Every structure is written in structure tokens, then in C-alpha cells.
Image (cartoon, rainbow, N blue to C red):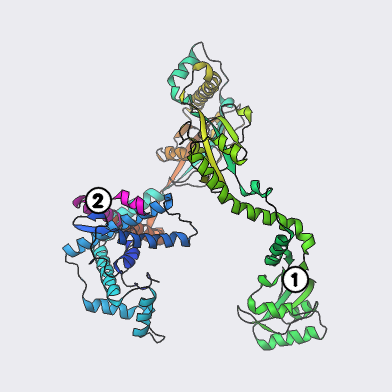
Amino acid sequence: MLTQMRKGASSWPSKILLGVIALSFVVWGMGGIFTERNVNVVGKVGDVDIEIQRLQAAYNQQARQFEGQGFQIDQGGNLSRAIARLAMEQLVESTLYRATAEEMGVTVDDATVRADIASNGLFQDDDGRFDPGRFSTLLISNNLSEAAYVSSLRGQITDSQLQNGIGAIPRAPDLMVDLIYGYRNEQRTAEITVISNDVLAPTVAPEPGELEAFFEDHADRYQAPEYRSADYVAIYPADLASEMTATEAELQQYYDTNEARWVDPEKRDVRRMAFATLEEAQTASDRVAAGEDFEAVAADMGTEVLDLGVVGRSDLFGDLTEPIFNLEQGEASAPIASPLGGYLVAQVTAIEPEVVISFEDARDEVARQLALEKAYDAMFDVANDLDDILANGDTIADAADTLGLPLKSVSRIDASGNALDPLSLQAIPDAPEFLPELFAAEQGFASPVIETADGGLLALEVTQMEAARPLTFEEARDRVASDWQIERQGDLAAQAADQAVAGLDAVRQLDSVFPDIAVTVTQPDPFRRSETPDIEGVHLDVTAALFAARPGDVIVMPADGQEAQVIARLLSVEPADPAGDEEGVIALRDNLTSAMISDLGDQFRAKLRADNDITIDQTMIDQYF
């Protein structure tokens, strides 16, 4: 609503204010916030103080946007503080630009503000005239005085004029547009084959000392990661559900309170025909009622029968529900006004009656559901008890024993969740918080109780730490041998491919230079420099090499995975044609112009920040948010 109340101050899209225009309405619309100075200053831009009240207002608006998208914001949590930092940055930007506008003499007179208000559709009656009563009602509903709104609006128009002035630059020049269009849209054609290394080159054995030398040259590849072991407790509502009990009265009450769960509503198999006029629909309805076949009537009257399938009441538009669900099986309806226009005649071909599961039949499911709900409630008590015990300095093992919780452990796993011994088949908790918490914790100190994203409670204690270290040659021997073999065979394969295509003339095809190998040569569709031919193993580096080549040149490059060679010959170059793509050129010019405006805005903003002292009290922000 507040954003809609300001429609006249639009400007070019850029990153300059990071959404401050929407934010400033609320901030500047709060009466008295700039006249009542106090000591609660959370930031300072030049000589202008930013009070905590302004930040709170800005934060509230940001938080509402996040909550509207389904985010849960916990006071003191990471998201809450991130939103506070974002709101503070927006206030800094707003203050910088407002002060700059004043220095540059950018002003807005009363007539401009009045005209903007009068032209705002939110404040107009049905005849398009300004309605003072509507204006007052909307301000009151948003907790704004007229003076506060006018002040806010004047500031927004001022900001808009400043931004439009910054962005008032000529469009991107034709020469720039044509050059960039040509660069992006030039196409090339090539013939390409991908041949496995083991086809091009034999497997060779390393000479004495070669593996050791390879290991030394690539020592950074062979590192043992940090490993940690830990005890932990991970509890979920389902774990506690088996301990929950309920009386018969509680079970009956739960059944009665959630009666919709135990009802499978009536469903009907429905078909319908549609007509443009009521008269046609009535004729069709009368003919079916007289005994004619539904489909035959539809065919005779030039319309089609649409089978809606088996539907419940909730599957139909509201205006269709009662007429259809009041029909007997085989009966055709009277004409029904369609919510999409025209008229319908429906027929029910089958009825599936409502099925109600009795309490006796549903009792086991009722017990499971009620136990699970009680378990969710019990999780709060478990979290508090576990937190209290760990706060006293007890170990995770002691806490688990005291509360009767299952104690689990992991042994020597890395930050990716891989165990040093893959045959240990350890079960790493699925909770995404587990590994980050494990590798952030200190040995010998229990972590705080964490509520996990998947609905559980987690607490852990590191029992052993093994620092990351370089592997010895003996520890890495098998990996070194495998890596050496792949790299060596790849080198030999590349050499063999280079020798085979050396001196290839323009007439011979690629497959002819490998007479002893079954080679598949593909000529993909023409491609741009940002595209990769759709051939397995071909990657963007191959495209780049072909765009650096001349027609007839042959390139040899390792394929994706380094286990094959890509051999490609450039056949032709197809220059771009800007004259034949007017829409594409216009879109490119618009994008380039917007990018130039954005860059100019970024530079202007950086200049303002460099010329003004900006201080932010992060400690105060953390205390409040």
C-alpha cells in the first residue's frame, strides 16, 4: 500500500539506492523522528545522525517483506541481524543522497507535490477525481499524518529527480552496439570427434622414481583433511512419540476435533458440454432430459464433451459445485452460467459416496497422530533440560544418561562427512547443521542445543581432533599411480592426435586420418562463442579455441574428465548481421545503456561514500536485533 501511494517518482532501475525509495516512505513518514534528537544514535553520515528508531522502522519494513515470503525471523538470529545490516545500509544510502540533493539545490515546490497527490489513483473516486476523504482514510490506515506524508512524498520526488539526473546520459553509440553485437553473435561451424585416450595411446608403466617425482610436483593434491570425532545427541519428535500415552477420552476428543481427517468426501465423475447462449444450453438440457444420449446431443449441436474426471466439491468453481452435486447419477443439469463465460450442461456418470472412518477404525492412526503432537510439545522440555545440564558443564554423555536420551557418535570424519575408514559405514546425521557445528566446536566443550532445520534438536561434543596434514608418499601411492597413469596416457594421446592431424589438407576429413580407429565425426549446428556444441566431452574451452582459429585450422584439446581428446577442425566463420536483427540490436542497445547508467550510478555512490565520514555502531545493532 505505501509503495502504491507513491507512483509518480519512478526512475531508471539501478543498484544505486538498493530499494531505498520504497523504504524511505516509512522512515521519513514517521512524525517527529527528525525533530526529537536523542542519544540513541546507531550511525552517522557526515553531520547527520541516524537514530535507532529510524533503523527499527526500516528493519520492520524489511522484515515484513521476508515474512511475506515465508521466512521465520527469530530475534537475535543470523537472519534478523542480516536484515538489520541491510536496513542500515539503505538508511546510509538514503541519507547520502538526500544531503547531496540539498547541496545541489534539487528542490520540489508545493505545486508539484499537490499535482502528484491529485493524480494518484489511490486517492481518486470512481470518476477519476481526487477524493479528500479517501486520501485521509488511507493516511490514517497507515498511521501517517498529512504533514508526514507530504514530507515523505517531497523527499521521494527529490530523490527521483536526482537519480534521473544521474542517469540522463545518451544511449549507447551505434559503433559500440555493432561491435558488441558482432562479437556476441558471430557463429562458427566445425567438424569434431572425441577419441578416448586408451584408443590413441597405450598404457605405460612408470620408470623408477617417476611416481616419487610426480608426487613431489603435485604435493598439494595429496593432503589428509582434518578429521574429528564426536559424541552427539539428535532427537526428533518421532523419537519421543513412542513414549507418549493418551487416555481414551483424549483419543476421542482428538478424533472429534479433527473430524475432517477421517472423512473421504463424496466424489463424482462429471462430463460437460459448453454453449455460448442460454437458449442453446437449455435446448441441450431438455433433449438429454428427454432421453437422448449426452454425447449425441453435443455432436448434433456442434460442441464437444469435456470429461472432468472424478472431482470433489473443492475441485470445482464455487458456482458449479451445488448444481453438479445436486444431480442424480445419469441426470443432466439445467444450464449453469460458467464463471469463464457462456453456459454449461453437466452430467454425472458415477457417484462415489462419502466415506467416514469410524473412531474404532481410525483409533490407531489417531493414537499415532496424537502421540506425535504431544512429542512436538515435549521437545521444548527436552531442549530446556538438555540446555540446563550442559550449561552446568556436564558432558554430552552425562546429559544423555541423565535424560535417558540415546547417545551417538561419529569417528574420524572430515568436513564433507567422509569417514577416514569408508568401511566403517558410519551414519552421519542428515541435519545440515551437524557438520558446520562439528567443525566449529572446541574439543571438550559441549555445543549449545540447536534446533535443526528438519525439526530436531542437536547437541554435540568433539572428543578427538586430527589436524589436516600432507600425506606421505606411501599413504598416497595408489592415488599417485592412478593420477600419473591418467596424465601420462593423456599426454601420449595428445601427441598421437597432433601427429595424426599434422599437415591435414582441406579436402581430407578427420575420420580419414585415423584409418585404424572407428571414429565418429560430427558437424554440429553453427555455434556462438558463448555456446558449447552438444557433443559429450566438448567444453567451452574448445569453443574458445575454435574462435581463436582460422578456417582449416585443427585443434587438439583434452575432453572433459581428461580421459579423451577432442579433435576439431574449423570449417567456416559466419559473421553476425546486425541489419537483419533489428529487435536484437535494440535490446542490446537498451541493455548497454542500462549498464552504463548502472556503472555511473555505482561510481557516483562510491564517490559520495568516499567524501563522507560514515560510522555504524554494530554493537548497538547486535543488541537491538
Specify whether 146 is left or right of 301. left
Q: Hey, which quadrant is residue 28 in on the image? A: bottom left
Position in image of residue 297 (x %, y %): 77, 81
Position in image of residue 13 (x %, y %): 34, 61
Name the foreground residue: 255 vs 29: 255
Q: Residue furthest right?
A: 291
Instruction: Determine which of the numbered discs, if any, sits on residue 615 in the image.
Output: 2
Name the foreground residue: 167 vs 222: 222
Residue 536 seen by the camera: yes
Position in image of residue 592 (x %, y %): 33, 56
Q: Which residue is mark 1?
A: 266
Q: Earlier in the sequence, mark 1 or mark 2?
A: 1
Residue at image coords 56%, 51%: 380
Are dots 1 and 2 in contact, CB under 8 Å? no
Residue 534 seen by the camera: no
In this figure, what is the number of numbered marks? 2
Looking at the rendered image, the quarter that the C terminus falls into is bottom left
- Magenta region, mostly helix, strand or loop? helix
The local crowd at label 1, few if under 14, some if 14 to 19, many if 20 or more residues have their Cα within 10 Å, is some
Name the foreground residue: 346 vs 362: 362
Give the CA separation, mark 1 to mark 2. Answer: 66 Å
Based on the picture, tell me whether residue 343 belongs to the magenta stretch: no
